[in-house]
Amino acid sequence: MLLWAPDPKGPAQAERVARITNLRKQKDLELLEADLKMAQQAVELGRDKSGPPPWYQMSLGMAEYRSVHFAAADEAVQAAIKGGAGDNSEQHR
């Protein structure tokens, strides 16, 4: 996935690549770093007036966790929870 989309066309593509590549444990440090950058890019590209969608933050949390950055992972997951707390739309559920 990281080879397929090294330069994502938008935040949704970056987020999906980051999420998919974090589903499985990775020992290759180069791939871990590339995936973390992809997740960070998704959050940055996805920013608007209300901030990035909660699932972008969740993907960042997954990437931080896989990179053994537990405090940053917790921060990203907490942001995802906070971002999705008041949203009852069917898309976000």
Image (cartoon, rainbow, N blue to C red):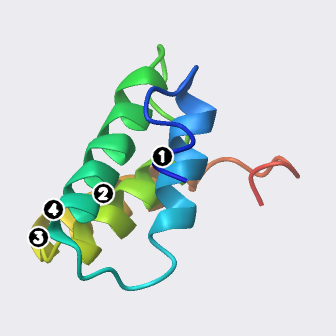
Q: How far apart are the alpha carbons under marks 3 and 4?
A: 4 Å
What residue does disc 2 label?
Answer: 76
What residue does disc 1 label?
Answer: 3
Local crowd at mark 4 within 10 Å, few (<14), some, or many (≥20)?
some
- Residue flagged by tag 3: what amino acid is it? Ala
Q: Residue furthest top?
A: 49
* 58 sits to left or right of 64: right
In the displayed structure, 22 sits above or below 54; it is: below
Q: On residue 72, which mark appears?
A: 4
Q: Nearer the N terminus, badge 1 or badge 2?
A: 1
- Residue flagged by tag 4: what amino acid is it? Ala
Local crowd at mark 1 within 10 Å, few (<14), some, or many (≥20)?
few
Q: Quadrant of residue 40?
A: top left
- Write the residue at 82% across / 46% down: 89
Q: How far apart are the alpha carbons under marks 3 and 1?
A: 28 Å
- Where residue 54 appears, x then y in whole percent? 53, 49
Give the structural element (helix, strand or loop) at label 4.
Answer: helix
Circles 3 and 2, Cβ within 8 Å, touching? The answer is no
Foreground residue, 58 or 5? Answer: 5
- Where residue 93 appears, x then y in whole percent? 77, 61
Please identify, in this view, whether the residue under mark 3 or under mark 1 is nearer the observer: 1
Q: Nearer the N terminus, badge 1 or badge 4?
A: 1
Circles 3 and 1, Cβ within 8 Å, touching? The answer is no
Please identify, in this view, whether the residue under mark 1 or under mark 4 is nearer the observer: 1
Circles 3 and 4, Cβ within 8 Å, touching? The answer is yes
- Residue flagged by tag 2: what amino acid is it? Ala
